[in-house]
Image (tube, rainbow, N blue to C red):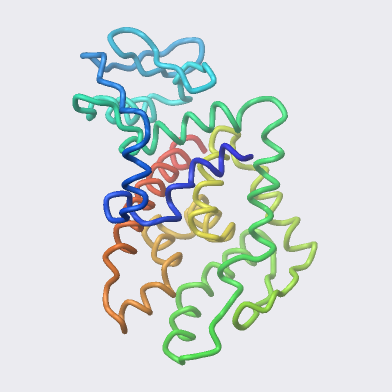
Amino acid sequence: MSNIRDLLADLEGPAPELDPMRAAQRAMRPQLPKRFYAAVTVEEGADGWAVQLDGRTPKTPRGQPLAVPTRTLAEALAAEWSAQGQVIDPATMPLTRLVNVTLDEVVGEGKLQAVIDEIVKYAGSDLVCYRAAEPAGLVARQAEVWDPVLAFAHERLGARFMLSEGVTFVGQTETAIDAVRRAVEAVPPFALGALYTLTALAGSALIALAVAQDALTPEAGWDAVHVDEDWQMAFWGRDEQAMARRAFRKKEWDAAVLVIRDVR
C-alpha cells in the first residue's frame, strides 16, 4: 500500500511553488523528460482502451500498458498527454498518475483486499463523526453538511455511526463497519484506486462512498471535506497557501470522480 500512499504524498504539503523548501527539493529532482511524441490517439486492444503516442502505448512504472476499461477514460488520459509542452510533467497529469497506481498497485493479484481494508479503516474514525462542541455556528454548519452523509450511510448502506465531540475517539459498531466493507467490495476493481483517493483526500470513507453512489455531487462532497477549513477562513481570512494546496488536491479529486463515474 505504500505506493498508493505515495500517490497522495504531495497533497499534504504546501503547493511546490509557494514553499521554499519544497521548491528546493523539486529543483534537486532529475530534470523532467522532454516530450518525445507528436500525435496522441487512443486505440482499443486486448488490454482495453490504450493511449497511443505516435502509435506506441506508454507503460506504467511497472511496465503495464497504459490502458483503461473505457474509451472515455482513454480520451481523458490522451488529453493530459496532448496538453504537455516541451517537457512531460507528471504533476499536471492527475488522471495518468491515478491510472498508473491503479494498474500497478490495485488491480494486480492479491492487492485488491489490501486496498479495500485501507478504505474501510477510515470508517473507524471517519471525519463526519467528529463534531465541534463550539462555536454554535460551526456546530450548525457541520450538522448541515455532514448529517446527510450519515443519513446516506443509514439509509443506503444500513449503517448507523456514533458521533463524538472534539477528537475523543468513538468506536463504531461491527455492524456499521461491515456495512461499509460490503459497499466498498461492490466497487469494480478498476475503480477501487479512485475510491481510495477520494477517501484519503476526504479523511472519510462515508463522503467518498456518498459521492461514488451519487448521494452527494462531487462538488458537495468536496465542500463537505472543507467545512472546518472554510469556517476558519471565514473569520481569519483566506490562506493563499492553503487554497493553492486545495486547488492541487481538487484535480486529484476530479480525476478520481471521473474514474468512478465512468467505470462503475
Against 58, is 16 above or below?
below
Q: Residue at x 42, y 89 (%)?
A: 137
Q: Residue at x 38, y 79 (%)?
A: 231
The quarter of the rendered structure image containing the N terminus is top right
- Would you say 38 lies left or right of 236 here? left
Task: Pick whichever, 63 or 180, lies toward us.
Answer: 63
Q: Residue at x 37, y 79 (%)?
A: 232
The x, y position of residue 9, in whole percent, is 48, 47
Task: Pick whichever, 164 or 90, lies toward us.
Answer: 90
Number of marks in the image?
0
Most extreme residue toward the top, as rendered? 55
Q: Residue at x 38, y 43 (%)?
A: 25
- Would you say 112 lies left or right of 261 here? right
The x, y position of residue 185, in whole percent, is 67, 43
The x, y position of residue 198, in whole percent, is 50, 51
The x, y position of residue 261, in whole percent, is 45, 42
Task: Pick whichever, 13 or 107, lies toward us.
Answer: 13
Against 168, is 211 above or below?
above
Task: Pick whichever, 34 or 107, lies toward us.
Answer: 34
- Would you say 152 lies left or right of 110 here? left
Q: Quadrant of residue 161?
A: bottom right
